[in-house]
Structure formats: C-alpha cells, structure tokens
C-alpha cells in the first residue's frame, strides 16, 4: 500500500492543479495562456502542477491584473456580466408575487 502513495499524491496534485487552472480567470493567470497551463499540467504529471503553483497561479492578493491591463480586465468583466442568464421565472404559484396579489 505504501508503494502506491507517490502515485496517489501525484494524481491528487495533478487533479487539484487542473481544477484550479480551469477555474481561474484567464486575465489573471501569469506567464502563459490558460490552455497552455492546462496542457502542461496534464502532460507532465509532477513538473506541470508544480510549475502551475509556482509560476502560473494567480496571486490571491490581487483581485485584478496590473495597471496596464486594467482596461482589458474591465471589458472582460462587462462582457461576462452581459452573458449572465436572465432571472428565472417563479417555480410555483406561491413563489409568484403577481399570483399572490390576486388572492
């Protein structure tokens, strides 16, 4: 059982870094494009995830990219906000304010 531990740790690190890379916003990822980081993490089991953690992962203290990319960041946020789906209609009559007013 102990001999499988390095493989399990490598797999866990790869899965963690893959999910982290996929969920990170592309504008705050450092050094490479998002797709390049995903491929690096998948193709190189130990080196890729460690490289992601050291050189690619966005800094947690930074909520936006550097000042030179501020306009791009704002444009990205506006376009992402426009893509939000419209609010869903009520599921049932007791959730519908118009129906409840008519009672």
Image (cartoon, helix red, strand yellow):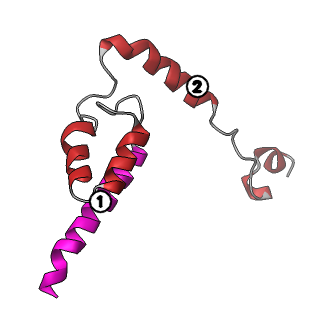
Task: Note whether 29 is above or below 23 in the view shown.
Answer: above
Are the two marked residues, 1 and 2, in contact with CB atoms closer than 8 angstroms? no
Q: Residue placed at 70% from the left, 38% from the top?
A: 86
Q: Which of marks 1 and 2 is nearer the N terminus?
A: 1
Q: What element carries label 2?
A: helix
Report the front residue among 60 and 4: 4
Tell me the crowding category of disc 2: few under 14, some 14 to 19, or many 20 or more residues within 10 angstroms, Cα based. few
Q: Is mark 1 on a helix, strand or loop?
A: helix
**Residue 10 part of the magenta-drawn span:** yes
What percent of the width, then of the height, locates residue 29?
Answer: 34, 34
Q: Name the residue under label 2.
A: 79
Query: Where is 59 relative to 98, above or below?
Result: above
The residue labelled by disc 1 is 14
Q: Residue at the location (18% across, 41% down)?
A: 54
**Quadrant where the N terminus is found in the figure:** bottom left
Highlighted range, magenta: 1-23
- Which residue is the extreme one toward the front? 43
Q: Is residue 46 shown left or right of residue 70?
A: left
Residue 24: x and y, percent?
Answer: 38, 41
The residue lying furthest to the left in this view is: 2
Residue for point 28% across, 67% down:
11
> Compared to 25, does 13 lie above or below?
below
Q: Where is residue 9 in the image (x, y as percent from the top left)?
A: 20, 69
* Nearer to us: label 1 or label 2: 1
Compared with 3, 40 (above or below) is above
């Amino acid at each position: 059982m102990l001999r499988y531990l390095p493989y399990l740790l490598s797999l866990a690190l790869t899965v963690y870094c893959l999910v982290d890379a996929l969920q990170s916003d592309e504008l705050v990822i450092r050094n490479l494009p998002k797709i390049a980081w995903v491929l690096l993490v998948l193709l190189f089991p130990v080196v890729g995830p460690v490289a992601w953690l050291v050189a690619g992962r966005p800094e947690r203290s930074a909520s936006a990219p550097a000042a030179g990319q501020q306009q791009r960041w704002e444009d990205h946020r506006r376009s992402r906000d426009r893509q939000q789906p419209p609010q869903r209609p009520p599921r049932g009559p007791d959730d519908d304010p118009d129906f409840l007013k008519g009672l």
